[in-house]
Amino acid sequence: MKKRIAALILCAALMLALSCSVLADEKLSFISVNDTLPPELINVATVYSGVTYVPYWLFTNYGLGVYYAYFSSSNAAYFYNADRQLYFSLSDGKTYDEDGYQYTAPAIMRGGTVYLPLGFMSSYFGGFSYSNIGGNEYGSILRINTGNATLTNEEFLRAAKNAMRTYYNAYNKNLQDTPASPEPTESPSHEGETVRLGLRGLPGDAMLERLRAFRMKACFFLTAEEIRGNADLVRRIACEGHGLGIVCTEGTAVEFQTGTALLSETARVRSLLCITPDGQAPAKGAAVFDWEYGTMEAQVRPAALYTVTAALDGGNDDAALLFPCGEDGENALSALLFFLSESGFSVAVPREID
């Protein structure tokens, strides 16, 4: 109860420093996020073919758990989280997921900004809900809830009334300039640049199929136990043209020698490539894969993936990546492969001389 009272007071006091004035006729369209009423979300929603659309940055800037990239070469917007991906082609209005399944939920462009159907994004990605909670003489509220709201819709509408009045007066008297919406970030072409891709762990069928679909090759780094227990899969990896290397979790020569012997016995592959926790070669002749971006950890977070893609997009040289494979990492890897393909990178197997 104390938290609710505090939230009511905080929300009611929001922006009361702005000057109040005589009411005008035009009501406002508010979007709230949990227990806040951000002024930059006033009058940003639009209705297209009876569907509510909101700008892309609502999903990326307000904790809705969706990440974004724009590809100028194909005039397409790409959105993803840890589990799912969506590709919006702005040229022909087509929308499809990472498996090529098409949806009748196009994105639209308004004033140079990508707008997305709110209901479809909520049902597809999850992580938040929304509702129209009515309004008053100052306007209506579309409330987004990420699970962190303290107030009920009725409590929030009452608490927000003073702030709504303040925004309403300022808006109708032209006392407050509306901030410009962020422009989509165009991704430059990276034709001619190569990414050496290392994957830690055993892939599933979906990952191998995805690599084949994108015509990309990678090096799978495996422990001796993974090689010993999955001989058929190791042979399949080799037959499909991917590289194989050794994971030395303890960084010892014994680990490296055991792993290389198993690779030779299982798949007739001789490899000197390895990865170690400290980046040091475990034995004479071993070639440690020196990656620039990535991790040896079992899972990669979407935010970390976004940081990597941003760094690659801002660079103009070859790079080396290492990411975890397996069930937990394959959705993030799918997003990475999509980004690399759309941006024009060539993806290749790490070499021992790298």
Image: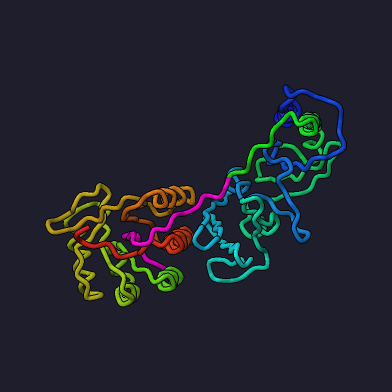
- The structure residue drawn at horizontal position 69% and vertical position 45%, both measured from the top left corner, is 145
Counting from the top left corner in percent of width and height, residue 131 is at 76, 49
Query: Where are the magenta residues, as a range?
Result: 183-205
Counting from the top left corner in percent of width and height, residue 244 is at 27, 67
Q: Viewed as shown, does residue 118 lie left or right of 97?
A: right
Whether residue 306 is visible:
yes
- Front residue of 166/150: it is 166
Q: Viewed as shown, does residue 228 lie left or right of 181?
A: left
Q: Is residue 201 magenta?
A: yes
- The structure residue drawn at horizontal position 75% and vertical position 41%, both measured from the top left corner, is 30
Looking at the rendering, in which quadrant would you find the N terminus? top right
The quarter of the picture where residue 247 lies is bottom left
- Front residue of 238/76: it is 76
Whether residue 198 is visible:
no
Q: Viewed as shown, does residue 237 lie left or right of 250?
A: right
Counting from the top left corner in percent of width and height, residue 56 is at 61, 50
Magenta: main secondary structure equals loop
Counting from the top left corner in percent of width and height, residue 337 is at 43, 62
Q: Viewed as shown, does residue 159 lie left or right of 116?
A: right
- In the displayed structure, would residue 162 be above or below residue 331? above
- The structure residue drawn at horizontal position 26% and vertical position 63%, both measured from the top left corner, is 245
- The structure residue drawn at horizontal position 67% and vertical position 64%, both measured from the top left corner, is 105
- Front residue of 287/75: it is 75
Q: Is residue 335 magenta?
A: no
Looking at the rendering, in which quadrant would you find the C terminus? bottom left
